[in-house]
Image: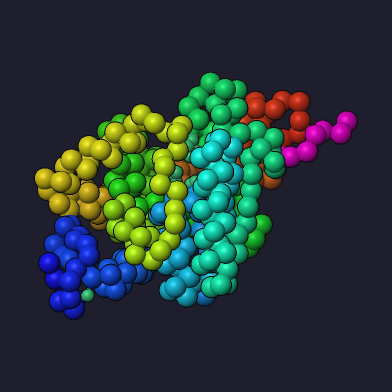
Amino acid sequence: MKCRVCRQAAVIDVRRHNAYFCEEHFVRHCHRQVERAISDHKMLNSDERVLVAVSGGKDSLALWEILLTLGYKADGVFIGLGITEYSDDSSRFVERFVKDVAAPAGGSLVRLDLQTDFGFDVEGAADATGRAPCSACGLSKRHLFNTAALNGNYHAVATGHNLDDEAAVLFGNTLRWQTDFLRRQRPVLPDGNGFPRKVKPMIRLSERETAAYCIVQGIDYQVDECPMSAGNSHIRYKEMLNMLEESSPGSKAEFYGGFLRNLAPILDEATPDGETQRTIRPCDQCGSPTDNEVCSFCRLLQRVRPETSPTGGTRSD
Ligand code: AMP
Ligand code: FES
Ligand code: ZN
Ligand code: ZN
């Protein structure tokens, strides 16, 4: 098969676009999809500083590389979650990427570690709360992305969520008609109330494309899935959507794109700032914005290590 642009031998097909690409034009295709997501949804201005949340996986490392290549001032933040070898390996992939790709292009890394900085890990949090590990993990990541972005004066936090991720989350939210979650699923959440802007510039690329991008660009990444996520519903939804995509290429993009075109604007009109009508105030313990006296991260800390103070360090009294 021949590349749609230059007619040289193709290395990949993108069935959703009914297109084949050579390496060079596949890379350009990926860059263009990210540029389009950024401009269509007004995610970033070219002079803004962005903090990319990097897990060591293909999507977030590809995202950081693409943003640097497109000329954005992009640094990274990695959170050590204490999930045995999985976290150690992920950390090594991030370190190598920083040394080989990000640092030479001017990007630096902020490193945080749940165990070292806050005295707990994801498994300990799951035991203490009696809830799925992903719940404490997600909550901690969201809190730490926000504080890292605000402490470092970044305009926005970018995550590597791709088309497959967003379509699967959309499916779950629609299945239960969780309108609050649907509202917050937009690819850009504006800053305000002490929260930084959140953006997802990879929404126009599928998992298969981000993996191929990393291979073509020589980016080594963590291939394994988090061991804690085995069997969760998100993975089942992805499998199901993959079956659908196989028989009808473009279904995922249709499903998610239709949400952005048809439902998101209606939800936006209902609450234009992206928030429900909550009263936001500073957390009594750490000062982060919250709709409670104490934010959910500090409440989690109280449960996982009740003998210590909520924001790090042992209480001195
Ligand atoms: P996940 O929730 O694991 O699918 O990850 C979604 C996005 O969150 C990734 O693409 C990253 O941008 C970010 N992310 C996940 N895990 C980490 C981590 N340990 N440190 C920093 N960012 C992360
Ligand atoms: Fe958070 Fe697996 S990455 S529980
Ligand atoms: Zn070509
Ligand atoms: Zn707090």
Q: Main secondary structure of the magenta part?
A: loop
Q: Residue at x 74, y 39 (%)?
A: 312
Quadrant in which the C terminus appears = top right
Q: Position of residue 196 (x, y in %)?
A: 55, 56
Q: Residue at x 18, y 40 (%)?
A: 243
Quadrant in which the N terminus appears = bottom left
Residue 17 drawn above or below residue 119: below
Whether residue 215 is visible: yes
Residue 91 drawn above or below residue 1: above
Magenta region includes residue 8: no
- Range shown magenta: 311-317
Q: Position of residue 307 (x, y in %)?
A: 76, 26
Q: Which residue is nearer to you in this view: 4 or 232?
A: 4
Whether residue 197 is visible: no
Q: Position of residue 42 (x, y in %)?
A: 40, 66
- Left or right placement of residue 67 versus residue 16 in this view: right
